[in-house]
Image: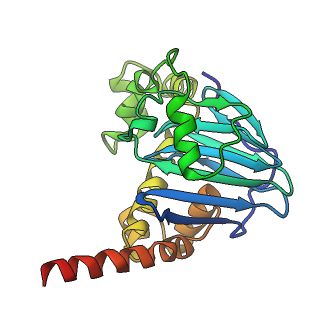
Amino acid sequence: MAAVTKSPYKTRMLDSWNYRPWAADSLIEVGTLSAAEPIALACHVHPDVQISAIRRGWRIYATSFGEFRATAGDVVIIPAGVPHSSHGGEGSVVTHLYVPNTRDAVRRIARPRHLRHSRAVSPEDLLDAVGAADLSDEVPFAKTLDLAKLVLCNDLEIGVVAERSGYSRDGFIRAFKRQIGVTPGAYRLAIRVAASRMRLKRGDPVADVAYAEAFADQSHFGRHFRRAYGVTPAAYRSAFAVERSISFQTRRRGGA
Protein backbone atom coordinates (compact mmCIF):
# COMPACT_ATOMS: atom_id res chain seq x y z
CA MET A 1 0.00 0.00 0.00
CA ALA A 2 1.11 3.55 -0.62
CA ALA A 3 2.57 5.60 2.20
CA VAL A 4 0.57 8.52 3.52
CA THR A 5 2.59 11.36 2.05
CA LYS A 6 3.15 14.71 3.72
CA SER A 7 1.09 17.59 2.42
CA PRO A 8 2.93 20.05 0.14
CA TYR A 9 1.33 22.82 2.19
CA LYS A 10 2.48 23.90 5.61
CA THR A 11 -0.04 22.83 8.22
CA ARG A 12 -1.87 26.00 9.22
CA MET A 13 -2.35 26.83 12.89
CA LEU A 14 -5.70 28.49 12.35
CA ASP A 15 -9.09 27.71 13.85
CA SER A 16 -10.63 27.39 10.38
CA TRP A 17 -12.13 24.03 11.25
CA ASN A 18 -15.26 23.97 13.40
CA TYR A 19 -16.73 20.88 15.01
CA ARG A 20 -20.09 20.25 16.62
CA PRO A 21 -22.57 17.43 17.30
CA TRP A 22 -25.24 16.99 14.62
CA ALA A 23 -28.54 18.32 15.98
CA ALA A 24 -30.49 15.33 14.68
CA ASP A 25 -28.10 12.74 16.15
CA SER A 26 -25.55 13.81 18.75
CA LEU A 27 -23.46 10.66 18.19
CA ILE A 28 -22.65 11.94 14.70
CA GLU A 29 -20.15 14.79 14.60
CA VAL A 30 -20.07 17.52 11.93
CA GLY A 31 -16.86 19.28 10.94
CA THR A 32 -16.82 22.27 8.59
CA LEU A 33 -14.01 24.17 6.89
CA SER A 34 -14.15 27.51 5.10
CA ALA A 35 -10.59 28.07 3.91
CA ALA A 36 -9.48 31.63 3.26
CA GLU A 37 -6.11 30.16 2.23
CA PRO A 38 -4.69 26.65 1.68
CA ILE A 39 -5.25 24.55 4.81
CA ALA A 40 -3.60 21.21 5.58
CA LEU A 41 -4.05 18.62 8.31
CA ALA A 42 -1.23 16.31 9.39
CA CYS A 43 -1.65 12.54 9.33
CA HIS A 44 -4.31 11.42 11.81
CA VAL A 45 -7.02 8.81 12.39
CA HIS A 46 -10.65 8.76 13.54
CA PRO A 47 -12.52 6.10 15.52
CA ASP A 48 -15.51 6.79 13.25
CA VAL A 49 -16.08 6.66 9.51
CA GLN A 50 -15.32 10.03 7.92
CA ILE A 51 -17.58 11.26 5.10
CA SER A 52 -16.15 14.33 3.36
CA ALA A 53 -18.31 16.50 1.07
CA ILE A 54 -16.56 19.14 -1.04
CA ARG A 55 -18.94 22.05 -1.41
CA ARG A 56 -16.52 24.46 -3.10
CA GLY A 57 -12.96 24.23 -4.40
CA TRP A 58 -10.98 21.02 -3.92
CA ARG A 59 -9.31 18.87 -1.28
CA ILE A 60 -6.89 15.94 -1.46
CA TYR A 61 -7.02 13.06 1.03
CA ALA A 62 -3.81 10.99 1.20
CA THR A 63 -4.22 7.45 2.53
CA SER A 64 -2.36 4.15 2.40
CA PHE A 65 -4.76 3.24 -0.43
CA GLY A 66 -3.63 6.23 -2.51
CA GLU A 67 -4.62 9.87 -2.90
CA PHE A 68 -8.17 11.03 -3.57
CA ARG A 69 -8.55 14.45 -5.19
CA ALA A 70 -12.11 15.61 -4.69
CA THR A 71 -13.69 18.68 -6.25
CA ALA A 72 -17.01 20.45 -5.66
CA GLY A 73 -19.85 17.92 -5.59
CA ASP A 74 -17.62 14.94 -4.73
CA VAL A 75 -17.68 12.82 -1.58
CA VAL A 76 -14.73 10.92 -0.07
CA ILE A 77 -15.31 8.18 2.51
CA ILE A 78 -12.52 7.06 4.86
CA PRO A 79 -13.08 4.07 7.15
CA ALA A 80 -12.50 4.23 10.87
CA GLY A 81 -8.87 3.75 11.84
CA VAL A 82 -7.34 4.52 8.44
CA PRO A 83 -4.44 7.01 8.74
CA HIS A 84 -4.80 9.96 6.39
CA SER A 85 -3.69 13.54 5.85
CA SER A 86 -5.37 16.21 3.75
CA HIS A 87 -4.85 19.56 2.10
CA GLY A 88 -6.92 21.84 -0.09
CA GLY A 89 -7.05 25.05 -2.00
CA GLU A 90 -7.82 28.61 -1.12
CA GLY A 91 -11.55 29.29 -0.93
CA SER A 92 -12.47 25.63 -0.39
CA VAL A 93 -15.56 24.83 1.64
CA VAL A 94 -15.81 21.31 3.06
CA THR A 95 -18.21 19.41 5.33
CA HIS A 96 -17.15 16.27 7.20
CA LEU A 97 -19.37 13.80 9.00
CA TYR A 98 -17.90 11.44 11.58
CA VAL A 99 -20.26 8.48 11.82
CA PRO A 100 -20.02 5.48 14.20
CA ASN A 101 -19.20 2.44 12.08
CA THR A 102 -22.14 0.55 13.57
CA ARG A 103 -24.59 2.70 11.58
CA ASP A 104 -26.25 0.98 8.62
CA ALA A 105 -25.17 3.63 6.10
CA VAL A 106 -21.46 3.05 6.76
CA ARG A 107 -21.36 -0.51 8.05
CA ARG A 108 -19.97 -1.82 4.74
CA ILE A 109 -17.20 0.79 4.42
CA ALA A 110 -13.93 -1.14 4.43
CA ARG A 111 -11.57 1.04 2.40
CA PRO A 112 -11.54 4.66 1.21
CA ARG A 113 -13.99 5.49 -1.57
CA HIS A 114 -14.45 8.46 -3.89
CA LEU A 115 -18.03 9.19 -4.99
CA ARG A 116 -17.85 11.63 -7.91
CA HIS A 117 -20.56 14.19 -8.64
CA SER A 118 -22.66 13.10 -5.67
CA ARG A 119 -23.85 16.67 -4.95
CA ALA A 120 -24.93 15.57 -1.47
CA VAL A 121 -24.32 18.29 1.13
CA SER A 122 -26.64 17.92 4.13
CA PRO A 123 -25.91 15.16 6.67
CA GLU A 124 -29.13 13.38 5.70
CA ASP A 125 -28.24 13.42 1.99
CA LEU A 126 -24.67 12.33 2.67
CA LEU A 127 -25.80 9.32 4.69
CA ASP A 128 -28.29 8.42 1.94
CA ALA A 129 -25.63 8.75 -0.78
CA VAL A 130 -23.16 6.56 1.08
CA GLY A 131 -25.81 3.99 1.98
CA ALA A 132 -26.87 3.73 -1.66
CA ALA A 133 -23.31 3.44 -3.06
CA ASP A 134 -22.16 0.17 -4.65
CA LEU A 135 -19.46 -1.10 -2.28
CA SER A 136 -19.51 -4.73 -3.40
CA ASP A 137 -15.81 -4.79 -4.39
CA GLU A 138 -14.50 -3.77 -0.99
CA VAL A 139 -11.25 -5.21 0.42
CA PRO A 140 -11.53 -4.83 4.20
CA PHE A 141 -8.90 -2.60 5.78
CA ALA A 142 -9.17 -4.79 8.87
CA LYS A 143 -7.19 -7.49 7.03
CA THR A 144 -4.18 -5.16 6.90
CA LEU A 145 -4.10 -4.42 10.63
CA ASP A 146 -2.09 -7.37 11.97
CA LEU A 147 1.09 -5.32 12.40
CA ALA A 148 -0.87 -2.38 13.78
CA LYS A 149 -2.30 -4.58 16.52
CA LEU A 150 1.21 -5.60 17.53
CA VAL A 151 2.16 -1.94 17.90
CA LEU A 152 -0.95 -0.91 19.82
CA CYS A 153 -1.41 -3.90 22.11
CA ASN A 154 1.68 -3.13 24.16
CA ASP A 155 4.06 -0.32 25.06
CA LEU A 156 7.21 -2.14 24.03
CA GLU A 157 9.94 -0.34 22.12
CA ILE A 158 9.53 -0.90 18.39
CA GLY A 159 12.77 -2.88 18.19
CA VAL A 160 11.41 -5.38 20.73
CA VAL A 161 8.10 -5.70 18.86
CA ALA A 162 10.06 -6.25 15.64
CA GLU A 163 12.25 -8.95 17.17
CA ARG A 164 9.29 -10.82 18.62
CA SER A 165 7.64 -10.68 15.19
CA GLY A 166 10.67 -12.08 13.39
CA TYR A 167 11.78 -8.80 11.80
CA SER A 168 14.79 -6.59 12.12
CA ARG A 169 13.86 -3.16 13.48
CA ASP A 170 14.25 -1.50 10.07
CA GLY A 171 12.48 -4.37 8.34
CA PHE A 172 9.51 -4.08 10.69
CA ILE A 173 9.26 -0.32 10.14
CA ARG A 174 9.37 -0.79 6.35
CA ALA A 175 6.73 -3.53 6.47
CA PHE A 176 4.51 -1.48 8.76
CA LYS A 177 4.72 1.62 6.57
CA ARG A 178 4.00 -0.48 3.48
CA GLN A 179 0.91 -1.98 5.11
CA ILE A 180 -0.49 0.93 7.16
CA GLY A 181 0.96 3.94 5.35
CA VAL A 182 2.89 5.50 8.24
CA THR A 183 5.69 4.46 10.58
CA PRO A 184 4.86 2.63 13.85
CA GLY A 185 5.79 5.72 15.85
CA ALA A 186 3.56 7.99 13.77
CA TYR A 187 0.70 5.51 14.07
CA ARG A 188 1.01 5.33 17.84
CA LEU A 189 0.98 9.12 18.01
CA ALA A 190 -2.09 9.37 15.75
CA ILE A 191 -3.98 6.89 17.93
CA ARG A 192 -3.09 8.86 21.09
CA VAL A 193 -4.30 12.10 19.52
CA ALA A 194 -7.52 10.39 18.41
CA ALA A 195 -8.06 9.06 21.94
CA SER A 196 -7.54 12.57 23.31
CA ARG A 197 -10.26 13.84 20.98
CA MET A 198 -12.74 11.42 22.51
CA ARG A 199 -11.75 12.50 26.05
CA LEU A 200 -12.21 16.17 25.15
CA LYS A 201 -15.61 15.47 23.64
CA ARG A 202 -16.84 13.99 26.89
CA GLY A 203 -15.55 17.04 28.80
CA ASP A 204 -12.24 16.02 30.34
CA PRO A 205 -10.02 19.05 31.15
CA VAL A 206 -7.31 19.71 28.56
CA ALA A 207 -4.48 19.34 31.07
CA ASP A 208 -5.87 15.99 32.28
CA VAL A 209 -6.17 14.73 28.70
CA ALA A 210 -2.57 15.72 27.94
CA TYR A 211 -1.40 13.79 31.00
CA ALA A 212 -3.61 10.76 30.35
CA GLU A 213 -2.34 10.39 26.77
CA ALA A 214 1.31 10.77 27.84
CA PHE A 215 2.15 14.06 26.15
CA ALA A 216 5.11 15.95 27.58
CA ASP A 217 2.91 18.87 28.59
CA GLN A 218 -0.23 20.76 27.58
CA SER A 219 1.63 22.78 24.94
CA HIS A 220 3.08 19.64 23.35
CA PHE A 221 -0.39 18.10 23.25
CA GLY A 222 -1.92 21.25 21.79
CA ARG A 223 0.58 21.38 18.91
CA HIS A 224 -0.13 17.81 17.85
CA PHE A 225 -3.89 18.22 18.21
CA ARG A 226 -3.98 21.33 16.02
CA ARG A 227 -1.81 19.76 13.36
CA ALA A 228 -4.18 16.80 13.17
CA TYR A 229 -7.57 18.48 13.50
CA GLY A 230 -7.05 22.18 12.81
CA VAL A 231 -8.34 23.53 16.15
CA THR A 232 -7.02 23.86 19.69
CA PRO A 233 -8.01 21.21 22.24
CA ALA A 234 -9.85 23.88 24.26
CA ALA A 235 -11.87 25.03 21.22
CA TYR A 236 -12.79 21.46 20.34
CA ARG A 237 -13.83 20.69 23.93
CA SER A 238 -15.98 23.81 24.18
CA ALA A 239 -17.84 22.95 20.94
CA PHE A 240 -19.46 20.01 22.76
CA ALA A 241 -20.08 21.79 26.07
CA VAL A 242 -23.71 22.65 25.24
CA GLU A 243 -24.46 19.06 24.25
CA ARG A 244 -22.93 17.79 27.49
CA SER A 245 -24.96 20.33 29.48
CA ILE A 246 -28.22 19.31 27.80
CA SER A 247 -27.44 15.63 28.37
CA PHE A 248 -26.66 16.27 32.07
CA GLN A 249 -29.86 18.27 32.59
CA THR A 250 -31.92 15.56 30.89
CA ARG A 251 -30.45 12.90 33.16
CA ARG A 252 -31.18 15.03 36.23
CA ARG A 253 -34.80 15.56 35.20
CA GLY A 254 -35.17 11.89 34.40
CA GLY A 255 -33.82 10.91 37.81
CA ALA A 256 -35.85 13.43 39.78
Give the answer, above or below, for where 220 lies relative to 39.
below
x%, y% of residue 138? 50, 19
| Residue found at x 85% / y 57% | 91
Q: Is 251 on the left or on the right of 21, as rendered?
A: left
Q: Does residue 158 appear in this view?
A: yes
- Seen in the picture, residue 129 relative to 190 is either above or below; the reply is above
Q: Is residue 160 visible?
A: no
Total marks in image: 0
Q: Nearer the viewer, residue 217 or 225?
A: 225
Quick one: which residue is furthest to the top in this view?
A: 137
Residue 62: give x, y in percent of width and height.
68, 36
Q: Quadrant of the C terminus?
A: bottom left
Scheme of image coloration:
rainbow
Q: Nearer the viewer, residue 186 or 12?
A: 12
Residue 211 position, x and y percent, is 39, 69
Report the residue at 48% width, 25% height from top: 172
Q: Residue at x 37, y 75 (%)?
A: 244
In the picture, which quadrant includes the N terminus? top right
Horizontally, is 58 left or right of 245 in the view?
right
Furthest residue toward left:
256
Viewer-side residue, 209 vs 103: 103
Q: Residue at x 75, y 38 (%)?
A: 70
Q: Position of residue 142 (x, y in %)?
A: 41, 26
Instruction: Using the image, determine if residue 32 lies above or below residue 154.
Output: below
Q: Nearer the viewer, residue 130 or 170?
A: 130
